[in-house]
Image: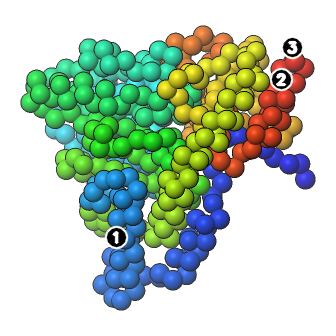
Amino acid sequence: MKEIHYFDNAATTRMSKQAIQKYVSVAESHIGNPSALHQEGLKAKTLLEDLREKSAHLLDVPSSAIFFTSGGTESNALVLNHLVWKPQKAEIILTNIEHPSIKEYGTLFRQLGWKVIYLDAPKGFVRSDDLRKALTDKTRLVCCLLVNNVVGSIQNIASLVSVVREKEAQTGRKIHFHTDAVQALGKIPFSLTALGVDSASFSAHKVHGPRGMGILYNTDASVTALNRAGGQENGLRGGTENLSGIAAMVTALEEAMREQDTNYTHVEKINILLRQRLSFLPILSPTELCSPYILTLSVKPWPSEVFTRILYEKGFCVSSGSACSNNAKQKSQGVLSAMLFHPQDAKSSLRLSFSAENTLEEAELLSQAIETTYRELT
């Protein structure tokens, strides 16, 4: 069987052995529904709240701000959906480099009568001045992701939040600031308190946890669920909690946070090596203020889907962009266009994304495979 070298960790990561073991252990030992009032239910409820406290401690926030969800997409949806309750249609500001789970909401809100303003991000970065110009007395929500999932650029969220708070002080109206921090969790250092955001979304499967699990950090009491269902998660996210999945997620998060500095140094070496080996190609990921976990380059004039298929046949898994939609290639091209990259670079982009499981030896093999493939096509 052909050996596979996996370099698509921004799409999903391998679930860690410790997380799997925790999942099985909790599934076997906690059979009750946390909402039930009998002994097994109370046992499950106790563990659920203990896991909430652990998550809050890892993120250095109050446990009352932690809500367990099915992933980053649902966490984003909970924040955006709460605006549907608003009787008066106003304005929201999104960036053109958001993950589709946020950006695609623009269509819905326009149909509902809201004004939606999109901000570009030249070379990967949203500019404070552009946000300042876009804010009006009618702005109710601003969304800007912390780490871009296509090129890895790290936004200056604290600065953008500061611009929003200045506008709030002028108008006396609350503006909710939400950040999708899925690609940041356990990978780059950040403080939710220092960023000053009202809410943030996280996903377990980006940090070697289970798929279908996530966290919403939210401090805004006005955020309410469209469907309150059974009232779980303080009424914000109904449905019986996936206790074993939550336990596995928290285990993976504990591992990621404990090894964050070590893993960052290791992955940074891989990133630097590949930048050096592939310097004959245009590198689209910025050299500064960029997560080392993502490296995007252009193999123009060759279409990215052709290149990714050939690399897979050679035993390498890479991506042509976000993996969160069947239309992923077009989505990533749109993001790169919003970053003002040349259309040909967008159509020919390859995203290499790493984890601590990747080795420098593997990176060498990947660089050789990319160079060989490029020369063969040329």
At x 49%, y 53%, the residue is: 257
Q: Tell which residue pokes out farthest to the top in this image.
A: 342
Q: Is residue 366 above or below residue 62?
A: above
Mark 1 is on which residue type? Glu
Q: Identify the image quadrant of the C terminus.
A: top right
Specify few, some or many for label 1: CA neighbours under 10 Å numbering under 14, 14-19, or 20 or more.
few
Question: Cα distance, mark 3 to mark 1?
Answer: 58 Å
The image shows residue 190 at horizontal and vertical percentages of 41, 41
Specify few, some or many for label 3: CA neighbours under 10 Å numbering under 14, 14-19, or 20 or more.
few
The image shows residue 204 at horizontal and vertical percentages of 51, 54
Image position of 191 (left or right of 122): left
Question: Cα distance, mark 2 to mark 3?
Answer: 10 Å
Residue under pointer 2: 371
Residue under pointer 1: 49
Image position of 353 (left or right of 324): right
Mark 3 is on which residue type? Thr
